[in-house]
Every structure is written in structure tokens, then in C-alpha cells.
Image: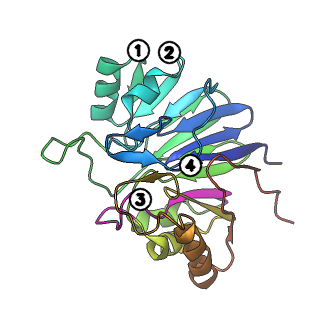
Amino acid sequence: MASGSVTYVGHATTLIEVDGTRLLTDPVLRGRIGHIRRIAPAPAPGLSVDGILVSHAHHDHLDLPSLRGLTPGVAVLAPPGVARLIARRTAHRATAVKAGDRVTVGGVEVVVTEAVHDDRRMPLGRGLGAVGYLVTGSARVYFAGDTDVFDGMRDLSPALDVALLPIWGWGPRVGTGHMDPERAALAAALLAPRMAVPIHWGTLAGPRVWWRDDPAMPAREFERLVAIHAPHTTVRVLAPGAAMAMPPAAA
């Protein structure tokens, strides 16, 4: 029987709990990052976690002040260049990982997956790596990080309980290496999870974004499109800060 929960903290930050192990993804816990402001309630301070999963180096996924606010000594997994940056700029000791690696954290196994995304910290910088993660225990939870759709998603599909899929961003549009609601629905068709939870929406906003008055619009559109492209997958829309229990076992 699946044991655990998922909390959508906001943007790409989620708290995944499986079999008593608590993993925090891409922690962004502050009220703003440069010109990008948080429009959803900030999370309560003092999150207690067993591990941190960092997908890539973009500032809305790798926020060094947020990492510094978490307890030092917690296991941090990150792509090689990102792990080196975290080790230099925080008190954490990050483990460098690449797609295909398997790492035990607490009572679960974390499988590192491919991601199709720009992996630089700055537009003219060098690549630091980009990955996703599959948390495996009594439940299997896929955190995509930031990625476009890729064929290898099919390989993650057997008995996938929850897919945490990015569906938008913090600006008026998303570009190459991201998913909008339709591409995320196509990803759900490849992954065939029992449940899909949209992330990367409704939390951070740059100036002059057209959806500020209706930040849940991308999530509603994702739900509509999953019903078309992946009708056997249930969509659960969580507002930033909301949590859900793992879906019950199939009959």
C-alpha cells in the first residue's frame, strides 16, 4: 500500500513524502527572486527534510539563499556543475548525479532521469547539467524539474503513481525546453501516471504577465487537455501550499 503525500509548495518546489522519507525539490522559499515576485503565500519556515533534489541551475530552481535557510548536512542531489556551485556557496555537501544514477536517500531510492532543458546558470554561461528525479518506494513519484517532452518518458511509465509536471512559468510565455499545458498533457500520455499534479504555475510572476488576475488558468487548461490526451490519468490540481495523500492502490 502506498504511503506518503505530496505538497505543492509552489513553482517547482514540492515536498514528496514516501515511506517516511521527506524530499524537497528545487527549493525557492523567498518572496522574490530579482524582478520575479511571489504571488502565492510563502511557505512556513523551518521545513524538516531528509533530502533535497535540485534539477538545474536557473535562478527560479536553484535559489542559494533558500538552500542556505535549510538545515546543513541534509543530502542534496544535483547535476555535476550545480553540485559544485552548491558546495562552494552553501554549507551543504551536494552529491553530483547524472541521468541513470540510483541513490538511496532515507527509505527510498531516487532514480535520476533525463531532462531536455537549457542547463546554464546565466545566458552566456557554461552548461551545469539538468535532470529530473523518480522517487521509488511503496509509491513511485516523478518530478520532472524543467523539461520539454522527450521519448524516454515512456520508459518511466510502468506503475507510475504520481507525475509532477511543469505546465507554465513566471512570464507571459514559455520557450524551448519547457512545457505548456498541451505539451505537459502529451507528457502525461507518455508517462501514463495514475495521477498528474501540475506544478510550475501560480506562484512566481514577472512584470506585466497577462495571467496575474487568473493564475490558475494554466492548471485548468492542463486538466482539460489531459482528459483528451491521457484520459486514464486523473489530474489533481493543488493550490500553492496544498497537500494530498498518495493515491490509493488500484482495485
Name the mark nearer the viewer: 2 or 3.
3
Is residue 160 rendered magenta in the image?
yes
Mark 1 and mark 2 in contact (Cβ < 8 Å)? Answer: yes
User: Whole-percent x and y of residue 213?
Assistant: 52, 66
Give the residue type that dot 2 points to: Pro
Which of the numbered marks, if any, corresponds to residue 169?
3
- For label 1, the SS is loop
Is 247 situated left or right of 54 in this image?
Answer: right
- Residue type, numbered disc 3: Gly
The span from disc 2 to disc 4 (Cα, nearest Å) is 27 Å
Q: Which residue is mark 1?
A: 91
Q: Amino acid at mark 4?
A: Ala
Local packing at callout 3 (Cα closer than 10 Å; few below 14, some 14-19, many 20+) is many
The answer to whether residue 89 is visible is yes
| Residue beneath the point at 50% across and 15% down | 72
Disc 3 is placed on an element classified as: loop
Q: Main secondary structure of the magenta part?
A: loop
Q: Which quadrant of the rendered structure holds the C terminus?
A: bottom right
Q: Is residue 122 left or right of residue 150?
A: left
Give the SS element for disc 2: loop
Mark identifier at residue 72: 2
Decide whether residue 18 is among the magenta residues: no
Secondary structure of residue under mark 4: loop
Residue drawn 51% across and 31% down?
Answer: 52
**Cα–Cα span, label 1 and label 4:** 28 Å
Residue behind mark 4: 40
| Crowd class of label 2 (few under 14; some 14 to 19; many from 20; radius 10 Å) | few
